[in-house]
Amino acid sequence: MEIKNTNINKGRAVLKWISKKQWDFILAIGDDLTDEDIFTALPDTAYSIKVGLGLTRAKFYVESIADVRSLLSKLERGNNA
């Protein structure tokens, strides 16, 4: 069982955080149902990735954490992912 305040979620926290500055690049990666709040709250220019299969509001998905590591390595090197 999980008990939480319905007025507080990851999406609201992200909105508050990203509103403090103009960001050139926003990337959100998550594997949990609660991460869907983030994917929903992000601006259209943001990139969102769900780890694992299943319905999601993320724009993209990868199958595993290994795929996330590979993607981040490519981004770090400046390769086309």
Image (cartoon, rainbow, N blue to C red):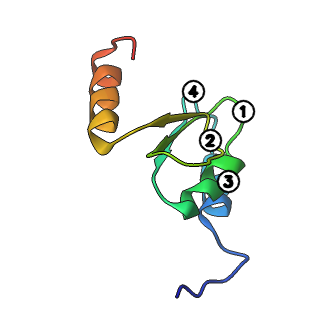
Q: Which residue is mark 3?
A: 15
User: Which residue is at the front of the view, 77 or 52?
Assistant: 52
| Neighbour tally class for label 2: few under 14, some 14-19, many 20 plus, Cα within 10 Å | few
Q: Which residue is mark 4?
A: 24
Query: Disc 2 on helix, strand or loop?
Result: loop
- Circles 2 and 1 in contact, beta carbons < 8 Å: no
Q: Which residue is mark 1?
A: 44
In three-dimensional space, the C-alpha distance between marks 2 and 4, rounded to whole angstroms, equals 10 Å
Q: Residue at x 57, y 27 (%)?
A: 24
Q: Residue at x 49, y 59 (%)?
A: 32
Is residue 38 among the parts visible in the rendering? yes
Q: Which residue is mark 2?
A: 21
Query: x, y percentage for residue 1?
Result: 52, 88
- Circles 4 and 3 in contact, beta carbons < 8 Å: no
In three-dimensional space, the C-alpha distance between marks 4 and 3, rounded to whole angstroms, equals 15 Å
First reached walking from the N terminus: tag 1 or tag 3? 3
Amino acid tagged 1: Asp
Query: Disc 3 on helix, strand or loop?
Result: helix
Amino acid tagged 4: Asp
First reached walking from the N terminus: tag 4 or tag 3? 3
In three-dimensional space, the C-alpha distance between marks 1 and 4, rounded to whole angstroms, equals 13 Å
Query: Disc 1 on helix, strand or loop?
Result: loop
Amino acid tagged 3: Leu
Q: Is residue 13 above or below residue 51?
A: below
User: Which residue is at the front of the view, 69 or 1?
Assistant: 1
Query: x, y percentage for residue 8?
Result: 66, 74
| Neighbour tally class for label 3: few under 14, some 14-19, many 20 plus, Cα within 10 Å | some
Quarter of the image for residue 81 reads top left
Is residue 19 among the parts visible in the rendering? no
